[in-house]
Amino acid sequence: MFRVMKIHEFDKSVFYRVACDCTDPEHDMTIELEVDEDILGLHIYSNLETSIYWGYNNWFTRQYKKIKYCFRLIFLGYIEVEQEFLFIEEEHINDFIKALQEGRDTMLDKKEKC
């Protein structure tokens, strides 16, 4: 499959790695399809990051952002970030859908065996 790789298959789960079209391996997404006795689930994992350097040219603004993120982490316990994942080529999109369908079918078969 084009930029979609099956990386693990266990008794009750199957894992795929999906590469971003920007080709940066840090943007890759890991998809886990998992079956439980009652639930068929889909988990999507992705590396997320934030940077104070992107979009802030002023040194003082960057330092303020660093302090703001630190205080947010200390007092709230989390930092909110977003990530963009690109699907540009039709083959990539189709293979992503194919991987989801293949994983779903595998999990449904395993669920019937439970």
Image (tube, helix red, strand yellow):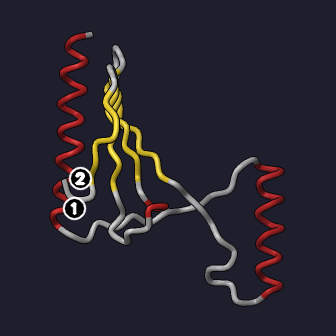
Q: Tag 1: residue type?
A: His
Indicate left or right for 79 with 22 as reference: right
Please give the name of the residue rendered at 65% of the width and 71% of the height, measured from the top-left corner.
51
Indicate left or right for 57 with 22 as reference: right
The spot of residue 45 in percent (x, y) is: 46, 46
Question: Circle 2 sits on which residue?
Answer: 96
Q: Furthest residue to the bottom?
A: 58
Q: Residue 69 carries which label?
A: none
43 in relation to 24, above or below: above
21 in relation to 108, above or below: below
Please give the name of the residue rendered at 32% of the width and 20% of the height, measured from the top-left corner.
11
Whether pointer 2 and pointer 1 mark residues with C-beta atoms closer than 8 Å, the reply is yes
In which quadrant will I find the C terminus?
top left
The spot of residue 68 in percent (x, y) is: 80, 66
Q: What element carries label 1?
A: helix
The spot of residue 36 in percent (x, y) is: 36, 19
Question: Circle 1 sits on which residue?
Answer: 92
In-front residue for pair 110/82: 110
